[in-house]
Every structure is written in structure tokens, then in C-alpha cells.
Image (cartoon, grey):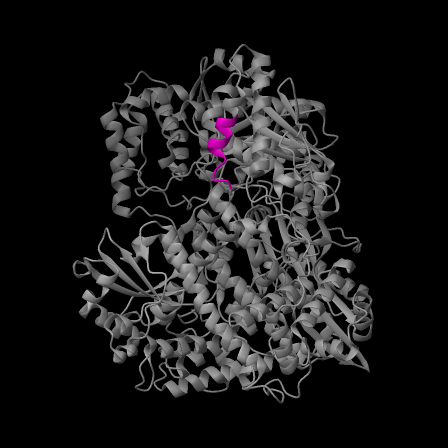
């Protein structure tokens, strides 16, 4: 196996032809001019360049390069400029606009060397004096390379000659200033890119052409002013003036065009920037060439690569790679290298290749095979060394070659992976783009390399445009390089530039540039910043530090909010909330505040927040007295362009469900702004009433809280301590599993499976195979160690679900909207629910069949296990949906080798229901928002009630332990974890009992042990057989409300060598408590027939129906529209006929006298179905089954009866005959019935959540 990275058009083509890329694959993707067309255009072209005034035409060509629609047409501009500067200076006429336009409309419409455009039309260089817009042309990554050179020379300590550095400083300043001048006068900002539909060269509009020609022309007097302003020597500009005697003018190779390195043409006192698109290239070439003139080229390149290596290490750390202290054997190769840990059982050898320096004493190609072997030899040497160092550990190794770009053409070739190791090579700028995308985690590249290696075993891959083209195809194809439906081709050729939009979007979103900031050490200086938030132009410093400095760019000057109090990461997180809140509300008030900030007449403005130390504490607020006075003292003072604000302890206000604390902060920030304005000049200050009005008008609604400060002791699931990062299902694992299903079946799968029974059997076999694979994998680990990993991951899912309930309403109130959050939550919820459920089922499998082997748990293997379990569940659900008669999709073997399943049922029914359900969830989040912020109050034991006594007796009879003691036991487990300061607790059963007895000495030992057993998942004889006393559905992962589920039994008990170990996580114990109480009080808890628990549940079901009816009645009355009859209306009472009792009762009769409508509302306190079996039960209940009437039919008959006997409703309204009757079923939750059987339902089915959210119009 091999991999290649192309840099430059002169690199050897990776297809193996031996030709240069520009004459091979690159040529295949270029636009051609036909032979006939070429004969016509050549004569026209020669006439064009020789018939008109040389200087005017050269300016015109330069001016055209300032049009974004000409981006990518650079080779033609380079040829035109080259041929024009070589023309004699003769008295010729200036070309008129029509002839100019006609020429480009009909000639020189393409060139075969013009690559697909990858760069922006304009990019940004950060320099001493701020931002400078440049025109990179086709020079992909050229701007980043130039920035790296400048940073290496001027920002890192080095011993380069001062005279060299001054020369570079002068040259860079002059050229960059000229570029910025052209961009600014042409109205061009950084990071512009426009797609063009037509390849012909465009020229500025007739009215703009003269102005654009002036823009590209610089008089010596103008340049002298620039030099004086920036304090540089103007003489250096001559280094960029083209020499007409340059020998390279005799060379037809476009890459040798002298204007590429000297793009200025001098005409007396006028300098014409003939090739603005060569500005980046000319400076990079000047930096390296001048270093040779000064005898410091080797030193320059060493500093450059050292700088890039430092950046690379920071970027690797940012992705989660951990640098090890392993010292590798010395090498003579011109490389830099380190070893990183990327997983529990994986090390990465990072080899940074210096592309601009040849390897000393080593031939590029071996004499016989033509393979590059020195990098492979070094890689083998390193891996052998690592194997010896880690001989007691079974490590896998990932070799990552990073090619350091320096502006030189470089072709890199390496060997393939051996065994389970992986290898990958990419340019530094490609890696940097991935880091900037924020998509990389420690295993992203490892997984991609593995998929690429597997794909290469099946087909040949060519990516002449480089690594990112392949990666982008992988990313956009569910992290697979193979199409899910189509057959595997013999050759996969990823088009050059196919990732360009992806890379440009990353760079544009990052928007790296500099802005002015005051520093104690250097005063006011330009500081590099990057985009931090999408919802507003909020930026953060590019370089990491302990300080929290945020910038908003929506005023005439940079406005900063800063704080430097943090001494540890936890404090910085808290500080960040306050800084972001302040800067966000400044952004929201920008229209009101702009006039005041302009009056400061400063180059920057800074708000320095100084937070009370109590605000920095991350522990609960319950342990201290909280200041609740509305007259809290804020210390505000101004100094130069800074406003200092000392924020007192606002905890009592932050814990409220309103944004009162943020209003207090913003009022004092505006007070400080007013003080600064009045201090600087006589501009009218903001009066206190005006400040209050501004703050109140923008900080609304009251729930618009940017600082989500809450007391987690009220809801410990929201405690964010001791959590691992959230990790959802990895698409690449799912794709890999789906690609391998057929091979694992050992049977032929037809292109179309006709029988539903055959489809069900196939699904069941797939499920069985996956379960067998999961069990095989699980047996290789020590179950306790693996459980620690899985439980911790699952614990994060539990926290994430709970935190969403807090976060989403705040986002909607501040900067988002309801529909956007529905779409986001629907996607994230699916991923989170699948991950959560998969982890729970894996935990159940391990508990059922524990093992005690020695394989090291690692995230890569866990990812695959999670994905396998998701497929177990998905194929199990598909089998259920067919077995229950809900679906019968087309299934069969696809050309790709996968099993295809028609998903119409999912998209037409399940997804639409899911969207409605998610909308309902978010609405309920908004309704419950206040509950998350009320101050915690101690729970006072109200004593035993008749109901609690009844429940405890029922539980003791059913489970051998009362509900009260179950809840106490769970509370003890939570307390143990909190006291141990850990999410996942592992303890010996004996120690647990002893610890709990210290909390509750009167806890009966037998009852305690019975409780632990009741709450524990334990070993079973077989994974596919339910223990005695349980049904088979209790062990199906895709079923809900299972007695043997992890949510019902949140402890895992592992018995080994006469010792019993129990594992649990406190957040999930709390979730288990909530789940148990929900099942109990919703009447859905399963109970044995004839017992006290079953009796209580029946009673509870009756009670909850009345509770829901009362809730709906109260809501309808509060709308002030309806006359609501306060009791259930019986048709038999209306008619006086006993036989009309068959129509049941009208739960709610609501009368809209204005619209003349009687609403007959049937209330159903429902719980939404979660799985296929529940959906089928719901359908049967409402629509009927096997000829039996469903619930809806009864309501339909009552509706018809009411319409035929409407006069009987005159007792409620004297004009009843003039009214119409509208009957509907109102459910407490969004149920799938309406979405699964819409065409069969004869009455509207509306959820109460939808009614409250959308209003009463939904009734019509």
C-alpha cells in the first residue's frame, strides 16, 4: 500500500504514470481549448497584446484581477501580463471598452493548467500593523505558509541577522500595504469567494474600469508616504520590479514566469501591480531567496519548521492526543518526531517531514524498486523500539506523517500499514484545517486510516488533490469510502478540489485575523483572534492563556470583556459565563450603544470584570449565606479606555429563573460606559432611568439567561463534576458493520426477498450474529474494568439529557428560535438515545455473562461495541415491526454487498411523529424552566400518609422491600458517590452494607441485602434465556419497561473468587429512582396479578384520568373564551334514555359562543409509545383488532349522536340548534397513533402539549 500527497503542479502524478501531475490527472480535470478554436484564438490573442497601449492594457489586466469572478483564471492573467510587459513601448491607442469586452467574450476562455480553485479570492495576513488583505491566486495554502514564515522570523526567538529581518520587514510591509490599498479601494474584504458559471475573463464595468486601473497603479510619492507611515525603507520595492532581461522570459513554462516573483512593472514614477494575485507567492519567494543572499537560509528553515512543529504539537494536544515522555533513538533524517497516546492501547508515532530540505546522504528513490524507503525504514525502527519498550502491553501503533509545507514542490510516498497498525500522511495545512473544524477527537484519524486501508484492499484509490478530498468524501458518506448502494468500482478517483468548499467554510468560520488590544507589557497591539460563536461576531484570542478575554466586533472600535482571575480550569469556566453574557448583551444593544462608543474616540474599549471570590466557587451555594438585597454594591471606575466593574456575590439572583442578575451587571456596565463618555468629552451621559429602559428592553423575556447558574444540589444529575466527555455513536463503525453483514451470514441473500417470514428470519439471524460477536468481544475483558468505561460514558449521556432541558429554553430566549432547536434536538436526541440505550444494553450483557480476562479496555473497541449493539436494537425493531404487522419493507441484496431496507415507513410515519414529540418536549422544557433555578429547600419528612403506607405495603408484598426503603437505599448510594467525589463507584458488597448502616443504623440487614439484590443486574445462565420468574421480553434490548433493564436495576453485581463487587453511577441511580416513580404514578409499572400493587396501579390509572381532565378544564377556562361545563356530561342524562348510556360520557364540554361551537373533548392521560410493540398495542386499543371495535369507534358514535341530537344541548346554551359539534380526542402526550394511521382515524387526535403550544386555533 502507498499514499501520496501532491504539493504543486510539478509533482509526480500519484496515479503512477511517471508524468508530472499537471500533464496527467490534473490535465484530465482541466478545461481544454479545441485545436480548431486554438488556431482562431492564437492570432486574435497576438493582435490583442500588440495593438494597444502597453501600460493601459497592463493596468486593465491587473484591474480585472480585482474582480472575484475572475478568481481561478490566473494562468491566463499570468500569460497576458508576461506578454504585455515584453511588448515594446510604442505610441499606440488605448483599447476601447467594446473591443476589450468582445475579445474576452470570444477568446482566451480557458487554459488547461488552471486547477480547480481551492483558495479564497482574498485572504488575510496578520502583520505588525494589523490585518492586510492579500490575493493568493491559485496558491493553495500559500497565505498560511507566508504567515508561518513571518511568525517564525518575527514572533519567536531566533538568531537570524538583524539586517535580514529588517529587509524582510520592509519588503513585507510595502507589498502588504499595496495589497491592502488595492483591496480597500476596490471594496474587498478578507475571505471572499465567488463561484463563476462562465470561464471567460470578466472586466470591470465601464464606469468602474478607470477607477480600478488607478487602484493597481502606485505613484512613487504615494509609496513614499506609505514608507514614512510604517517607518520602512522604500528602496526594497525595487526587489519586486520585474527585470525584462530575466532569462526566464525565454522559458515557456508558466511556472517560470518572472512576474510570479516580481509582480511590479515600473514606468517612470509609476509602479503597476501587474499581478496582484502573485502577492503571496512573491513575498514567500523573497523571504527564502533573501535568506540565501544573507547566508542564513538553513537557519531560517530550521526556525520555520521549529515554529510549525510547535504549532503542530499544540494542535495535536487540542485534539486530545497526549504527549508521552518516550525518547526515540536518534536519527540522521531531517525530521521531527514524537510519540503520543491516543487511546488506552494505542500510541501514535508522529513524524514531521521537512519538505523544503532534502534528506542528507539518502537517495529519494531506492535504485531497484523505486520505493521511498528511508521513512519506512525509520518507521519500522521506531515501531520495533516501541514494541520493546512496551513488551508487556499489547499496543497498536498509528504512524502519522505530517508534511511541513514551505512553498516548495514536494512529493511524499510511504508504505502501508502492517497488521492492525495504521499509517496516514497529510500536509500540515490539511491537518490544520481539520483541527480548525473542531471535528477531530483522539481517534478520528486512526479510524479514517483504518477505513482507507480496508477500502484499498477492495479497490484502487487515487486522490490527486490530496488527503482532504478523500477525507471529505468519507465525512459526507457516513464515514465510509464505499457507497452504501452501488457496487465497489475498480478505481476510485476523488476529484481535485472536491473538498475545497469544505475547507474554505472552515477557514471562513474561523475568521482568523488581528484586532487591537491593550496589554500591560506592550501597550496597544494587534492580537490574533478567532471566531468563537456563530450567533454573533464574538471572538476569542487565538493563543491559549489563563485569562478570559472575549471580543465583539459590531462597533466602530474593538470592544473587549476581560477577566484574569482564574487560577484553575474550573474557575475559568465560571468566569467565561460572565464574560460571554456581558459581551452578548452588548451585542444585542449595539444599535443603542454605538453612538456612545463612537464618542470615546479611542482605538479600543475594554470592560474589565472583577468577580467576587464567592462567585468563583464551584461547590453548592447552600453552605453560605446568600446576599439577596437589591442594593448590592457594584464598584465602577474608568481609566483611559478601560471600564473596571467589580461584581459582588450575585448567587441569590443567579439562582433565580429570571435574568435579574444579568440585568444588574449590564446596568452597571452601561453606567461605566456613561462615566467614560462623560470623562472623555461633554457628550450627554446616560441617565439611570435611560439605562434601566435600555436594559429592560433588550434583556427579555425574563428567561433570557446567558449565565446558567443553578444549584445542582436540587438536581444532582445536573452536577457537572467528574464527567467524561460525551461520545456518541461513531458513523464509521456503523458503516463498517453494515458493510460486513452479508459476509457474516454464510448464506445467499437474494436481490429481493419476497416473503415477510423470510425477512423476519433474516433480521433475527443478523441480530443473533451481532449478539454472538458482542459476547465474543466482551469475553476478552475484565468485566469490572470494562464496566467502569461503559458506565462513565452512560453517565455523561444521562447528564447531557438533563442539561438540554436547561440549555434549550435559554438558547431560544437569547439567540435561537423554537423551530431551529426542534431540528437540532431531533438529530441530537436520536444520536443520544441510541448511544444511551446501547451502553445500557452492553452493561446488561456484561452483568449477565461476566468475564475476567486481561484485554485492556479502549475507546476504539468500545465504539465498535456500541455500534454493534445499536444494530442489534435496530434490526430487532425491524423484525418486531414486521412481526406485529406495522411494516413490510422491501429488502434485498444491493450491488454494494449491503442489505437494503426500504425506509419509507420510518420517514413517512416515525420521523414525523418524532418531530412533533420533540417539539412537545422543548415546549415542556420551557414550561418547567423556572423549576431548575428555585433555591433548594430541605425536604421535611411529612410523615407517613395513607397513600405511602398503601404503597409500602404493596411493594413489601411484591418485592420484599418497601418503596420508602428502596428510595432510602438509592439515596445512600448517591451519597457514597458524592462523598467519594466520583461518577462511578466500585465497592465490595460488604463495605456497601457497612457504609449504609452508618447512615441508617435501623436498616434491617436482610431487607438491605434484598434491596441490593432487587436493584442489581446479576449473572444469568444464558444471555438469551430469562431467569425464572421473568419473561423473554424482559431481556430484549429493544423493548421498554423491562424488569431486567439497567434503568430498573442500576447496580451491577459481579461475583468472582468469593468476592462480590458492585458498580453504580449516582446520576443513573437518580434516573432509576425517577423512572420507578414515573412508572408507579403513571400506572405502567408491571405487577403480579391479584396483589396489592396491581390494585394500587388500577386505582392510580383511574385517578390520573381525572387529574388530567381537571388540568385541561382549568386551562380552557383560563383562556377566557370557553364556557366549560364543570362536570362530565352523560348522553343518557341529556336524553333521559338509559340505552344512550352506550355512548359513554363527554369528559369535557367546552362552548365557544362566539364561534357557535360545542367542543366534545375526550381526555386521555396517555404515555407515548416508545417501541414498536407499544405502538402496535396503542393502534389495537384505539382502532380495534380482529373485528373488535377500538376506543375511537365509541367516540365516533357519540359524535354522531351529539350532531343528531344537538337540541339536547340547549340546557347549556339556548341557541344550541345554531351551533355545530366538533369532537376530538385530547391526549396528554404526543402519541404515534395519528402519524401511523392518519387515514383510518375518524376523529382529530390532538396532544394537550400541542394545544398549549399552538393555541386554540388548532381545535379548528
The image quarter containing residue 272 is top left
Q: Is the magenta stretch mostly helix, strand or loop?
A: helix
Q: Which of 790 and 484 is in front in this view?
A: 790
The total of numbered circles placed on residues is 0
Please provide percent x and percent y for residue 799.
61, 58
In this rendering, the answer to whether 1074 lies above or below 115 is below
Q: Nearer the viewer, residue 666 or 72?
A: 666
Name the residue at 50% across, 86% down.
Answer: 746
Q: Does residue 1036 appear in the picture of this structure?
A: no
Q: Which of 510 and 1255 is in front in this view?
A: 1255
Residue 1123 lies within the magenta run? no
Please provide percent x and percent y for residue 274.
43, 26
Name the residue at 49% across, 32% down.
Answer: 696
The image quarter containing residue 1092 is bottom right
Q: Is residue 16 left or right of residue 102?
A: right
**Quadrant of the image containing the N terminus:** bottom right
Name the residue at 37% across, 57% down.
Answer: 1251
Q: In this view, does 1185 lie to the left or right of 836?
A: left
Residue 701 lies within the magenta run? yes
The stretch in magenta equals 692-702
Amino acid at each position: 500500500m502507498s499514499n501520496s500527497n501532491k504539493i504543486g503542479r510539478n509533482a509526480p502524478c500519484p496515479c503512477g504514470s511517471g508524468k508530472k501531475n499537471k500533464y496527467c490527472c490534473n490535465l484530465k480535470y482541466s478545461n481544454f481549448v479545441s485545436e480548431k478554436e486554438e488556431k482562431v484564438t492564437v492570432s486574435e490573442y497576438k493582435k490583442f497584446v500588440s495593438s494597444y497601449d502597453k501600460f493601459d492594457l497592463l493596468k486593465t489586466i491587473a484591474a480585472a484581477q480585482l474582480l472575484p469572478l475572475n478568481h481561478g483564471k490566473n494562468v491566463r492573467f499570468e500569460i497576458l501580463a508576461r506578454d504585455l510587459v515584453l511588448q515594446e513601448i510604442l505610441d499606440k491607442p488605448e483599447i476601447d471598452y467594446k473591443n476589450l469586452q468582445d475579445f474576452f467574450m470570444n477568446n482566451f476562455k480557458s487554459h488547461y493548467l488552471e486547477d480547480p480553485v481551492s483558495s479564497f479570492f482574498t485572504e488575510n495576513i496578520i502583520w505588525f500593523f494589523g490585518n492586510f488583505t492579500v490575493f493568493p491566486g491559485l496558491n493553495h495554502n500559500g497565505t498560511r505558509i507566508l504567515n508561518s514564515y513571518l511568525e517564525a522570523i518575527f514572533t519567536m526567538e531566533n538568531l537570524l541577522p538583524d539586517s535580514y529581518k529588517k529587509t524582510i520587514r520592509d519588503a513585507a510591509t510595502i507589498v502588504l500595504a499595496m495589497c491592502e490599498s488595492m483591496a480597500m479601494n476596490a471594496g474587498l474584504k478578507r475571505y471572499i469567494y465567488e463561484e463563476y458559471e462562465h470561464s471567460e475573463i470578466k472586466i470591470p464595468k465601464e464606469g468602474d474600469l478607470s477607477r480600478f486601473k488607478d487602484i493597481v497603479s502606485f505613484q512613487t510619492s504615494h509609496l513614499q508616504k506609505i514608507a514614512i507611515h510604517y517607518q520602512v525603507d522604500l528602496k526594497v520595492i525595487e526587489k519586486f520590479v520585474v527585470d525584462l532581461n530575466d532569462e526566464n522570459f525565454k522559458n515557456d513554462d508558466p511556472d517560470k514566469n518572472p512576474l510570479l516573483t516580481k509582480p511590479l512593472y515600473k514606468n517612470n514614477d509609476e509602479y503597476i501591480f501587474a499581478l496582484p494575485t502573485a502577492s503571496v507567492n512573491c513575498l514567500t519567494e523573497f523571504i527564502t531567496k533573501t535568506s540565501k543572499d544573507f547566508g542564513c537560509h538553513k537557519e531560517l528553515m530550521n526556525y520555520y519548521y521549529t515554529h510549525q512543529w510547535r504549532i503542530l504539537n499544540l494542535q495535536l494536544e487540542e485534539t486530545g492526543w497526549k504527549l508521552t515522555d518516550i525518547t526515540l533513538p536518534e536519527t540522521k533524517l531531517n525530521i521531527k518526531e514524537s510519540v503520543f497516546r491516543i487511546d488506552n492501547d494505542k500510541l501514535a508515532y508522529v513524524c514531521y517531514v521537512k519538505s523544503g530540505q532534502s534528506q542528507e546522504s539518502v537517495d529519494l528513490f531506492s535504485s531497484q524498486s523505486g520505493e521511498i524507503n528511508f521513512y519506512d525504514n525509520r518507521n519500522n525502527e521506531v515501531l520495533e523500539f516501541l514494541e520493546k519498550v512496551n513488551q508487556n502491553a499489547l499496543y497498536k501503533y498509528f504512524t502519522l506523517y505530517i508534511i511541513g509545507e514551505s512553498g516548495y514542490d514536494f512529493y511524499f510516498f510511504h508504505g502501508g500499514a502492517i497488521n492492525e497498525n495504521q499509517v496516514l500522511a497529510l500536509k500540515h495545512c490539511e491537518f490544520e484545517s481539520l483541527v480548525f473544524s473542531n471535528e477531530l477527537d483522539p481517534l478520528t484519524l486512526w479510524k479514517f486510516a483504518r477505513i482507507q486501508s480496508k477500502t484499498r484492499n477492495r479497490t484502487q484509490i487515487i486522490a490527486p488533490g490530496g488527503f482532504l478530498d478523500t477525507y471529505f468524501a468519507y465525512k459526507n458518506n457516513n464515514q465510509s469510502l464505499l457507497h452504501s448502494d452501488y457496487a465497489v468500482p475498480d478505481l476510485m478517483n476523488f476529484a481535485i478540489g472536491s473538498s475545497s468548499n469544505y475547507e474554505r467554510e472552515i477557514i471562513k468560520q474561523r475568521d482568523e485575523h488581528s484586532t487591537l488590544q491593550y496589554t500591560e507589557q506592550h501597550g496597544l497591539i494587534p492580537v490574533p483572534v478567532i471566531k468563537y460563536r456563530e450567533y454573533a461576531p464574538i471572538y476569542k484570542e487565538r493563543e491559549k492563556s489563563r485569562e478570559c478575554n472575549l471580543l465583539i466586533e459590531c462597533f466602530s472600535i474593538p470592544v473587549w470583556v476581560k477577566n484574569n482571575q482564574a487560577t484553575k480550569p474550573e474557575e475559568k469556566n465560571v468566569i467565561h459565563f460572565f464574560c460571554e453574557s456581558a459581551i452578548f448583551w452588548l451585542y444585542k444593544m449595539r444599535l443603542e450603544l454605538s453612538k456612545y462608543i463612537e464618542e470615546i474616540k479611542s482605538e479600543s474599549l475594554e470592560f474589565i470584570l472583577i468577580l467576587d471570590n464567592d462567585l468563583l466557587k464551584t461547590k453548592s451555594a447552600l453552605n453560605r449565606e446568600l446576599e439577596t438585597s437589591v442594593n448590592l454594591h457594584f464598584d465602577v471606575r474608568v481609566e483611559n479606555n478601560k471600564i473596571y466593574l467589580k461584581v459582588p456575590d450575585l448567587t441569590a439572583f443567579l439562582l433565580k429563573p429570571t435574568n435579574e442578575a444579568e440585568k444588574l451587571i449590564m446596568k452597571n456596565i452601561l453606567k461605566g460606559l456613561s462615566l467614560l463618555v462623560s470623562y472623555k468629552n461633554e457628550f450627554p451621559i446616560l441617565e439611570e432611568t435611560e439605562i434601566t429602559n435600555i436594559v429592560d428592553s433588550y434583556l427579555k423575556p425574563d428567561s433570557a439567561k446567558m449565565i446558567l447558574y443553578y444549584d445542582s444540589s436540587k438536581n444532582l444529575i445536573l452536577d457537572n463534576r467528574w464527567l467524561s466527555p460525551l461520545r456518541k455513536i461513531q458513523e464509521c463503525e456503523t458503516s463498517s458493520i453494515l458493510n460486513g453483514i452479508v459476509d457474516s451470514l454464510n448464506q445467499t441473500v437474494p436481490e429481493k426477498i419476497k416473503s415477510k417470514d423470510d425477512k423476519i428470519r433474516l433480521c433475527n439471524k443478523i441480530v443473533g450474529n451481532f449478539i454472538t460477536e458482542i459476547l465474543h468481544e466482551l469475553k476478552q475483558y475484565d468485566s469490572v474494568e470494562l464496566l467502569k468505561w461503559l458506565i462513565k460514558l452512560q453517565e455523561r449521556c444521562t447528564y447531557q439529557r438533563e442539561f438540554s432541558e436547561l440549555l434549550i429554553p435559554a438558547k431560544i430566549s437569547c439567540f435561537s428560535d423554537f423551530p431551529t432547536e426542534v431540528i437540532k434536538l431531533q438529530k441530537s436526541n436520536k444520536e443520544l438515545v441510541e448511544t444511551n440505550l446501547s451502553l445500557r444494553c452492553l452493561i446488561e450483557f456484561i452483568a449477565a455473562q461476566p468475564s475476567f480476562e486481561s484485554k485492556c479496555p479502549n475507546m476504539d473497541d468500545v465504539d465498535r461495541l456500541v455500534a454493534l449493539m445499536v444494530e442489534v436494537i435496530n434490526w430487532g425493531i425491524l423484525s418486531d415491526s414486521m412481526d406485529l404487522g406495522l411494516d413490510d419493507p422491501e429488502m434485498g441484496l444491493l450491488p454494494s454487498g449491503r442489505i437494503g431496507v426500504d425506509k419509507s415507513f420510518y420517514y413517512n410515519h416515525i420521523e414525523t411523529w418524532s418531530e412533533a414529540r420533540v417539539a412537545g418536549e422543548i415546549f415542556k422544557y420551557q414550561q418547567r424552566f423556572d423549576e431548575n433555578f428555585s433555591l433548594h429547600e430541605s425536604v421535611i419528612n411529612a410523615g407517613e400518609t395513607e397513600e405511602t403506607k398503601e404503597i409500602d405495603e404493596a411493594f413489601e408484598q411484591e418485592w420484599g422491600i418497601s418503596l420508602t426503603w428502596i428510595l432510602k437505599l438509592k439515596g445512600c448510594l448517591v451519597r457514597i458517590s458524592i462523598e467519594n467525589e466520583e461518577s462511578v463507584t466500585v465497592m465490595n458488597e460488604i463495605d456497601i452494607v457497612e457504609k449504609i448502616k452508618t447512615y441508617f443504623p435501623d436498616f434491617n440487614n436482610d431487607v438491605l441485602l434484598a434491596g441490593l439484590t432487587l436493584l442489581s443486574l446479576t449473572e444469568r445462565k444464558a444471555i438469551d434465556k430469562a431467569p425464572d420468574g421473568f419473561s423473554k421480553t424482559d431481556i430484549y434490548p429493544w423493548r421498554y419497561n423491562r424488569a431486567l433493564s439497567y434503568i430498573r436495576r442500576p447496580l451491577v453485581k459481579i461475583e468472582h473468587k468469593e468476592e462480590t463487587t458492585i458498580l453504580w453511577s449516582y446520576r443513573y441511580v437518580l434516573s432509576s429512582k425517577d423512572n420507578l416513580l414515573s412508572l408507579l404514578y403513571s400506572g405502567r409499572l408491571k405487577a403480579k396479578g391479584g396483589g396489592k400493587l396491581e390494585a394500587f396501579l388500577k386505582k392510580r390509572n383511574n385517578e390520573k384520568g381525572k387529574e388530567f381532565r381537571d388540568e385541561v378544564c382549568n386551562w380552557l377556562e383560563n383562556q377566557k373564551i370557553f364556557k366549560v361545563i364543570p362536570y362530565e356530561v352523560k348522553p343518557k342524562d341529556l336524553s333521559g334514555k338509559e340505552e344512550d348510556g352506550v355512548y359513554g360520557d363527554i369528559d369535557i364540554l367546552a362552548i365557544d359562543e362566539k364561534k357557535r361551537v360545542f367542543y366534545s373533548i375526550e381526555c386521555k392521560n396517555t404515555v407515548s409509545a416508545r417501541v414498536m410493540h407499544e405502538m402496535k398495542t396503542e393502534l389495537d386499543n384505539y382502532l380495534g383488532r380482529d373485528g373488535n371495535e377500538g376506543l375511537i369507534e365509541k367516540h365516533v358514535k357519540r359524535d354522531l349522536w351529539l350532531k343528531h341530537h344537538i337540541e339536547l344541548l340547549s340546557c347549556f346554551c339556548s341557541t344550541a340548534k345554531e351551533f355545530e359539534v366538533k369532537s376530538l380526542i385530547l391526549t396528554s402526550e404526543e402519541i404515534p397513533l395519528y402519524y401511523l394511521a392518519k387515514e383510518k382515524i375518524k376523529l382529530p387526535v390532538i396532544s394537550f402539549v400541542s394545544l398549549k403550544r399552538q393555541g386554540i386555533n388548532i381545535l379548528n
